[in-house]
Image: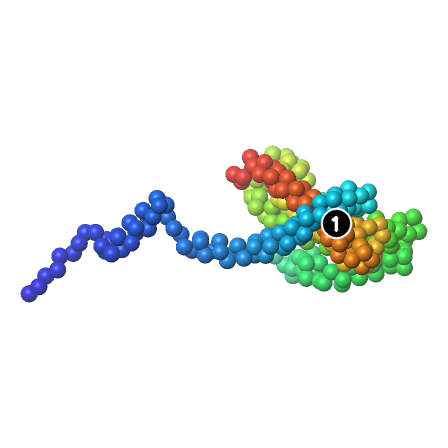
C-alpha cells in the first residue's frame, strides 16, 4: 500500500519557481495587467500627441508667421475675451449652482429630484447647435427673457452677455455635478453637530460643509471654465460678435484658409496648455488638509 506524504509547503515547486523568476526579473515585479492597461490607455493619449505633433511641426517650420499671428492685437484680445467670458460664466455658476448642488446632495431620493437632475444634465446630451438654439430663442430680442431684459438695456444678440449666457448653459452640468459629489462626501453628522452647538442651516453650510468641499468647487470650476471657453456652436448662434477665439478661428478659416487659422489654433493650444497645467498643479494644495474627511 502506497502512502503519500503531504508537504507542509502550500506552494508547488513549479509555482515557486515562477514566482521567484517574476520577483527577480531586474529586481521588480512585472504586473502585466497594468502594462496592458497602459498600452490600451496610451492609444488615446497617443492620438492627442500625434495631433499636437502634427500641428506643432508645421507651425514651428515658419516661426516668423507664428509670432506675427500670436502677437497680433486681434488674437490677444480674442483670447482674453474668451477667458474672461468663461470666468464670468463660472462666477455665475458658483453663485447660483452651489445652492442647487447642496440641495440635490442633501435631499432624499424622489421623483422630483430625479427630474431636476435630468434637467441639469440636459446640456450634456444635446448637440451644441441645439443648445445654442435654445439659448437664442430664450434670450433673443423677442424671447421670453430677452424681451424684458432688452427694455432695461441688456442685450444678448451679438453682445458679450449672449456669449456668457451660452457658456453658462453648456458648462453648468460640469460644475453642479462636481459640487454635488463634493457635498455628498461631507458626512451629514458633522452638520448635525454644528446645529447642536447653535448653528443654523446656513451657518453649518458656511463653516463646515463648504470649506470641506473647496477642492470639489475648484475642480468643478476648472472643468466648467474649460468647457465654456471651448464652446463654439452654442455661442455663435446668439453672439457671432464679439469674436471669441473659436469664432475667430472659424472666421479666418472661411475667409483666409488654413494658414492663419492654424497659427491661431496653435497659439491657443500653447496658452491653454500652460494655463491648465498651472490650474491642475494648484489642485494639489487646495483643501489637502481636509482630505481626512
Point out the image quarter for the N terminus. bottom left
Residue nearest the viewer, comparing 105 with 157: 157
Q: How crowded is mark 1: few (under 14 residues within 10 Å), some or many (20 or more)?
A: many
Q: Is residue 226 visible?
A: no
Q: Which residue lies furthest to the left in this view?
A: 1
**Residue at image coords 79%, 50%:** 244
Q: Quadrant of residue 200?
A: top right
What is the x, y in percent for residue 40?
A: 50, 58
**Residue at image coords 82%, 58%:** 255
What is the x, y in percent for residue 166?
A: 78, 54
Q: Residue furthest right?
A: 151
User: Residue under circle 1?
Assistant: 264
What colour-coding does the image apply? rainbow
What is the x, y in percent for residue 229?
A: 73, 49
Circle 1 SS class: helix
Q: Is residue 131 left or right of residue 29?
A: right
Task: Please state the total of marks drawn on the protein image.
Answer: 1
Residue nearest the viewer, comparing 246 with 154: 246
Q: Is residue 147 visible?
A: yes
Q: In this view, does 161 lie to the left or right of 14?
A: right
What is the x, y in percent for residue 238?
A: 83, 57
**Residue at image coords 68%, 40%:** 202
Q: Which residue lies furthest to the bottom in this view?
A: 1
Residue nearest the viewer, comparing 14 with 267: 267
**Residue at image coords 68%, 47%:** 60
Q: Is residue 240 left or right of residue 171?
A: right
Amino acid at each position: 500500500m502506497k502512502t503519500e506524504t503531504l508537504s507542509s509547503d502550500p506552494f508547488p515547486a513549479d509555482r515557486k519557481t515562477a514566482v521567484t523568476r517574476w520577483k527577480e526579473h531586474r529586481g521588480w515585479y512585472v504586473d502585466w495587467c497594468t502594462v496592458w492597461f497602459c498600452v490600451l490607455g496610451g492609444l488615446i493619449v497617443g492620438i492627442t500627441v500625434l495631433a499636437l505633433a502634427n500641428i506643432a511641426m508645421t507651425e514651428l517650420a515658419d516661426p516668423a508667421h507664428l509670432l506675427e499671428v500670436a502677437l497680433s492685437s486681434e488674437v490677444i484680445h480674442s483670447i482674453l475675451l474668451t477667458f474672461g467670458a468663461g470666468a464670468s460664466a463660472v462666477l455665475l455658476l458658483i453663485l447660483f449652482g452651489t445652492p442647487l448642488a447642496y440641495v440635490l446632495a442633501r435631499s432624499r431620493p424622489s421623483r422630483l429630484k430625479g427630474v431636476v437632475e435630468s434637467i441639469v444634465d440636459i446640456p450634456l446630451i444635446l448637440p451644441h447647435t441645439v443648445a445654442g438654439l435654445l439659448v437664442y430663442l430664450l434670450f433673443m430680442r423677442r424671447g421670453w427673457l430677452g424681451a424684458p431684459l432688452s427694455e432695461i438695456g441688456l442685450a444678448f444678440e451679438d453682445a458679450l452677455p449672449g456669449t456668457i449666457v451660452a457658456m453658462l448653459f453648456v458648462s453648468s452640468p460640469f460644475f453642479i455635478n462636481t459640487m454635488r459629489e463634493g457635498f455628498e462626501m461631507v458626512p451629514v453628522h458633522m452638520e448635525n453637530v454644528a446645529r447642536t452647538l447653535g448653528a443654523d442651516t446656513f451657518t453649518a453650510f458656511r463653516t463646515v460643509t463648504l470649506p470641506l468641499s473647496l477642492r470639489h468647487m475648484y475642480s468643478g470650476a476648472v472643468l466648467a471654465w474649460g468647457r465654456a471657453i471651448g464652446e463654439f456652436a452654442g455661442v455663435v448662434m446668439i453672439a457671432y460678435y464679439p469674436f471669441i477665439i473659436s469664432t475667430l478661428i472659424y472666421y479666418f478659416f472661411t475667409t483666409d484658409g488654413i494658414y492663419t487659422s492654424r497659427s491661431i489654433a496653435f497659439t491657443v493650444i500653447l496658452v491653454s496648455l500652460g494655463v491648465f497645467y498651472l490650474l491642475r498643479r494648484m489642485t494639489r494644495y487646495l483643501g489637502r488638509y481636509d482630505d481626512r474627511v
